[in-house]
Amino acid sequence: MYLANRQVKIMAMEVKNLVHSQCPFCSVQCKMQIEFTEQQGAAEAAIKVEGLMNKASEGRLCVKGMNAYQHATSKERLTQPLIKRNGVFVQASWEEALFVIASQLTAIQEEHGADAVGVYGGGSLTNETAYLLGKFARVALRTRYIDYNGRFCMSAAASAAVKTFGVDRGLTNRLDEIPFTECIILAGTNIAECQPTLMPYFTKAKENGAAIIVIDPRRTATAELADLHLKVKPGTDALLASGLLKAIVEEGGLDEAFIRERTKGIAAVLQQLESVQLGEVAQATDISEKDIRLAASLYSKAKSGMIFTARGVEQHADGHIAVRNFLNLALATGKIGREGCGYGAVTGQGNGQGGREHGQKADQLPGYRLIENEQDREHIAKIWGIEPEELPRKGVSAYEMMELICQRDIKALFIMGSNPIVSNPNAGYVEEGIRGLDFLVVADMLMSETAKLADVVLPVTAYLENEGTLTNLEGRVLLREKALPAPGEARDDWQVLCALAELLGKGDKFAFHSAESIFEELRRASQGGAADYYGITYERLRKEEGIYWPCPAPEHPGTARLFEESFAHPDGRAVFAELVMSAGSEQTDEQFPLILTNGRLLPHYLTGVQTRRSHSLIAREVAAVLEIHPQTAKKYRIADGALVEVQSRRGSFVVRSRFSKAIREDTVFAPMHWGGVQNVNLSTNPLLDPNCKMPDFKACAVSIRAYTD
């Protein structure tokens, strides 16, 4: 069998049965050791996975990490290029597949212009691939249309941090400070299921006497740890944060010295707060005024405190301002830039942090430079050996790209490491647009729902088979070494991009021979930028395990805690956000009376392309479910375990009900890991945050009925 043959070969080649790697899933990026043991007479080698000691997960692995090897060694792996002929995929050589791609893209651009081709990346790509994908789009294809699925992950938190602090890094301080802080606010983050190896940091904090406040419409496994659970109505997080600030002000909890010396903009906020009535906030959020005041008191009176946000707060049409309102709390109480005090945007994807730093976003160049900034353009153009005017201008966000596809403005799409027909909101509309493309290329390791629609599918390596750096949620850059050879004819992502660039006449700009050689150019491209990697090298990463950015020089130790002396704005001050009293998300009515929210389940990851290929993980959650309160189910005559159709103003999906008293009675919850009729994003709202273009995933109005068709 493929698995056995591959492992026996590895042991024979390396004369040992141990390999070291790094989990491909969440943003903790846990290190691991995989032991392959050939058993005489057995069809397959026995596999044992253990965590390796590291500074982030401290040697822990969750169930996803323990079983990640299963998708990498799956017999469903793509191992040879595929070209669709007469509606059927046939195997092809790399030479033929690359020639078809280059010819088709060139023909489309010659007829319709460079911007007729779009590029769509992913937040799990290595830093080297993310960097090279941005360069490929702008230099080899000369298109301005590039964005990535991380737009749906971190854009609200990233844009809020940039406006508030001047720079965006997931955590402003170290993970190992968490156990010693006195108060922790976890807003819209279910760490117990999404980043399980981090939970001991929070349990240790609780053991040390920390007050833990969880803000979530569901009583999740994370909320079980809370001293105070605020079961907020979905879509009202921004208003709740304003209410917390109002209570802090009324109770005299402001750090006047910190505000005076290190911030600006408080006067306008205080004036706005005069019109905020806690009773009205309580009514709108469905959180009692007593609990709002209690949460504010716990946080403001603590000597140290940290605030964490994630998708529950951020994936809204007002996600940017919701995060900024929470950041106002940190500034108002002076809880930033010192031991045990800070903010953390809990990154979702494995390289959600690094993936947004080096050029996959429509408006960014490597090092967090801006594509519309003339000095930034000059710097990158010099590194890339082109003139600044040759660089395209900024494009549009991920969902807006899908709209341009549906409008036929973008006629060809190159996708690397993403599954947009499942992950985008209003997924039925997105799939219709992608089906109408003149030409679609997908580079992936497994046949995703999107790959099935492609004209050409390119097989690429998995986490065990490629080398590169990833940046975890702390901003710590880590090196993941290659552990196994690629199966069949699969190639590294960067090799695919370099080969295509050669055929497109730009080979001299992509003359790389290894991931490390790409990183060396990335270092120079990022030098002097907000995300400065210049002082980081593969040699240092092998010796030091991981290095925090910014790291501006080879002798620099890296910056573990940000903002100790000043913020990243030119004047060194952080900026308070003026309050925006948002109307919230899509409103319910008689036809659509319930609120649908969504998220993750412990055994699965993103759209499930990888975890659904793991027999151990799929056995834990074999299909999507609809979490629903028993009283709500009774009202709509839905039995536990029955099929339910969930309908919004955009579309519907069908899943089985799962009764839970942990969820609000006006809210239902569905996971995001399945496509087809189980795809929750057939219903979700594509309304975009005007600041960061984050869609309103987390709250849409729906109706439900027992499915009988």
Image (tube, helix red, strand yellow):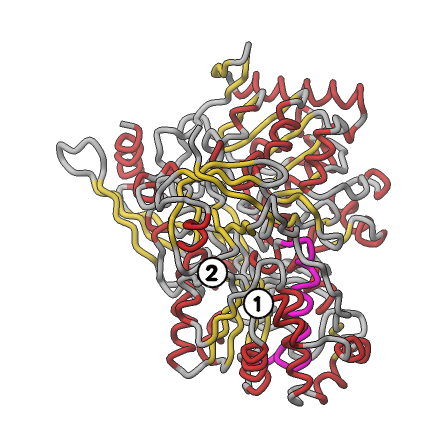
Tell me the residue at 83%/54% (across/down): 375
> Which range is magenta?
316-339
Q: Is residue 500 above or below residue 520?
A: above
What is the three-letter code of the residue carrying label 2? Answer: Arg
Determine whether, in the image, residue 281 is placed left or right of residue 43. Answer: right
Q: Position of residue 3 (x, y in %)?
A: 29, 33
Q: Quadrant of the N terminus?
A: top left
What is the three-letter code of the residue carrying label 1? Answer: Asp
The image quarter containing residue 334 is bottom right
The image quarter containing residue 571 is bottom right
Whole-angstrom CA distance, mark 1 to mark 2, is 13 Å
Asked if residue 165 lies in the magenta stretch, the reply is no
Q: How many marks?
A: 2
Closer to the observer: label 1 or label 2? 1
Secondary structure, magenta segment, majority class: helix
Q: Position of residue 181 (x, y in %)?
A: 49, 80
Q: Quadrant of the C terminus?
A: top left
Q: Nearer the viewer, residue 123 or 538?
A: 123
Tell me the residue at 77%/28% (across/down): 409
Determine whether, in the image, residue 443 is placed left or right of residue 573. Answer: left
Q: Position of residue 674 (x, y in %)?
A: 46, 38
Q: Which disc number belongs to residue 286?
A: 1
Q: Which residue is mark 2?
A: 218
The image quarter containing residue 572 is bottom right
Q: What element does badge 1 sit on?
A: loop
